[in-house]
Image (cartoon, rainbow, N blue to C red):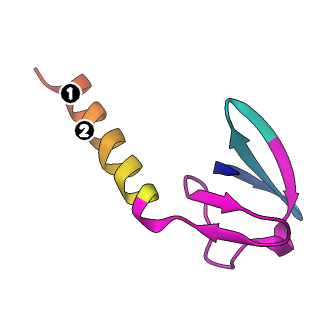
């Protein structure tokens, strides 16, 4: 399954998956994981999807530019 890291709460990572949030143990995540990262979650492994994360960040930046243009 795929999701986006929403936030860290102590030893939990809150991930948004299909519009709902789920908690996962922080120990499953790579140490470099941060809020906003797109992740693929398998049984006992989480992989940061760097390309998807970068694409999403660029899309958000473009939307922000469009909103703030005069």
Q: Position of residue 17 (x, y in %)?
A: 70, 40
The kind of secondary structure element at disc 2 is helix
Magenta segment includes 46: yes
Residue at the (69%, 77%) spot, across then down: 30
Quarter where residue 69 is shown: top left
Q: Which residue is labeled 1 in the image?
A: 66
Q: Which residue is labeled 2 in the image?
A: 62
In the image, taking residue 48 as reference, residue 70 lies left or right, namely left
Q: Position of residue 24 (x, y in %)?
A: 86, 57
Residue at the (65%, 60%) spot, across then down: 40
Identify the image quadrant of the C terminus.
top left
Quarter where residue 60 is shown: top left
Which portion, as a residue range, is magenta?
Answer: 22-51
Residue at the (24%, 38%) spot, across then down: 62
Quarter where residue 52 is shown: bottom left
Q: Is residue 51 above or below residue 63?
A: below
């Amino acid at each position: 399954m795929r999701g986006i890291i929403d936030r860290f709460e102590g030893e939990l990572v809150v991930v948004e998956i299909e519009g709902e949030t789920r908690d996962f143990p922080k120990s499953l995540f790579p140490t470099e994981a941060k809020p906003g990262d797109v992740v693929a979650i398998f049984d006992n492994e989480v992989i940061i999807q760097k390309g998807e994360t970068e694409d999403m960040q660029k899309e958000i930046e473009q939307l922000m530019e469009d909103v703030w243009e005069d």
